[in-house]
Image (cartoon, grey):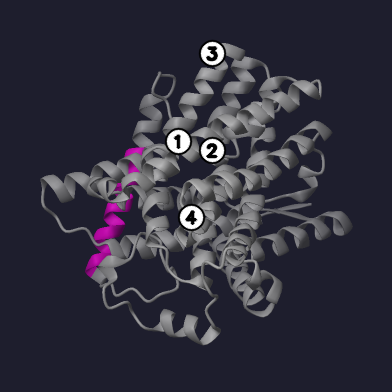
Amino acid sequence: MEFTFNGFYTLISAVIVLLLGRLLVNKIDFLKRYNIPEPVAGGLVAAILSLLVHSFLGYSITFSSQLQTSFMLIFFASIGLSANFMKLKEGGIGLVLFLGCVAAYIVVQNAVGMSLATLLGVDPLIGLIAGSVTLTGGHGTAGAWGEIFETQYGIQGALALGMASATFGLIIGGIIGGPLAKLLINRHSLARAKTPAQIEDRDTHPDPHPEDLAPFENPHQVRLITADNAITTLGMFAACLAFAEFMTGYSKGTWFELPTFVWALGGGVILRNILESVLKVDIFDRAIDVFGNASLSLYLAMALLSLKLWQLADLAGPLVIILTAQTLVMALYAAFITFRIMGKNYDAAVLAAGHCGFGMGATPTAVANMQAITNMYGPSHKAFLIVPLCGAFFVDLINATVIQVILKFFA
């Protein structure tokens, strides 16, 4: 028997998952030690409970996907609204180097997926689906490309396959990022973990210079915003989502067709820079930060709440092998390539955790991974400047280009 939760019950469930995740991370030393994000901790427990209920009682719950999608779009819009063109210069050579690491890994990821698919005797495009289409792209890109693979390339069940792979990446990306960064930090003595008292003091005392905080940095810290700021910011989010909805419909079937979340992100970039650079309007970054972080947590919680583990158990053996290999390659690449190229320092370790999120679960997972690390070891302004900029301006464009080139030559 299947129950359907509307938006209100879905939101209540997501909040419970987040509170559960916070409790687990605070009480279980293993989760705190390895910097597992709170939405991942609580969401995995909820997914396991859902599996047990389905297995023994035959009940399952379908949550409101519309609400989950809305929070995802708000988060991506917040990335765009935080992307000031002037900050591109601030990113400097670090932004270029990290972008190079991410772009190169997209090629590596697809090479691994398609090579293994060929060796295992399945269509190489299955390896592409279990590559950057779903792992770097996440659920939004998986949904956008799933229908294309089914209708144009004859890959039956490509959408379900993509969603399963993206869900796997969302979980694994959130699990391996924190432990990997912790290993790098401890091995190279890059930082010392903060005590619970230090963390509490930081969270309860507003930063005297909030303008110095990078987007999404220190999500638990108090931000001073007003009702007027909140209302204005909500209006900007609404404009971004309206733009995304319009462009998704307008571009459908054209050469510039893109997933809705890319349009939401792009709308945020355009709106931010027109208001700030052309109309000279002050942008309330603190309000954008608060709404963006809240949407990120709720989106991740809802994504994991919607995970039906019994469906993942039906995945074909080759897909499991490919995804397992992708996980190992991602961890090795982040540790031996990204970390070294970015300078082998504390910022590089935080960026390595972010790259695990990029490479396996998309921008929300990358930000959550970095937040888990900086919450324990201290701020990394460089990481929180570079990662949102990459997510806002480059990653989806590069990924789409690589996929198109591969399809042109190999499909």
* Residue nearest the observer in this picture, 376 or 139: 376
Residue identified by numbered label 3:
408
Residue identified by numbered label 2:
137
Which numbered disc flags the more N-terminal residue, 3 or 2?
2
Disc 3, SS: helix
User: Mark 1 Cα within 10 Å, few/some/many (few <14, many 20+)?
Assistant: many
Up/down of 369 relative to 239, above or below = below
User: Mark 2 Cα within 10 Å, few/some/many (few <14, many 20+)?
Assistant: many
Residue 230 lies in the magenta stretch:
yes
Residue 101 lies in the magenta stretch:
no
Residue at the image position 64 percent from the left and 30 percent from the top:
129
Residue at the image position 57 percent from the left and 43 percent from the top:
359
Alpha carbons under labels 4 and 2: distance apart: 23 Å
Which of discs 1 and 4 lies nearer the camera? The answer is 4
User: Mark 3 Cα within 10 Å, few/some/many (few <14, many 20+)?
Assistant: few
* Residue nearest the observer in this picture, 50 or 45: 45
Could you tell me if the residues under marks 3 and 4 are in contact, i.e. CB atoms within 8 Å? Answer: no
Could you tell me if the residues under marks 1 and 4 are in contact, i.e. CB atoms within 8 Å? Answer: no
Residue identified by numbered label 4:
348
Could you tell me if the residues under marks 4 and 2 are in contact, i.e. CB atoms within 8 Å? Answer: no
The residue range painted magenta reads 228-244
Which numbered disc flags the more N-terminal residue, 1 or 2?
2
Disc 2, SS: loop
Residue type at tag 4: Ala
Disc 1, SS: helix
Could you tell me if the residues under marks 1 and 2 are in contact, i.e. CB atoms within 8 Å? Answer: yes
Residue type at tag 2: Gly
Query: In x, y percent, where is residue 241?
Result: 36, 45
* Residue nearest the observer in this picture, 99 or 301: 99
Up/down of 178 relative to 88, above or below = below
Residue identified by numbered label 1:
396
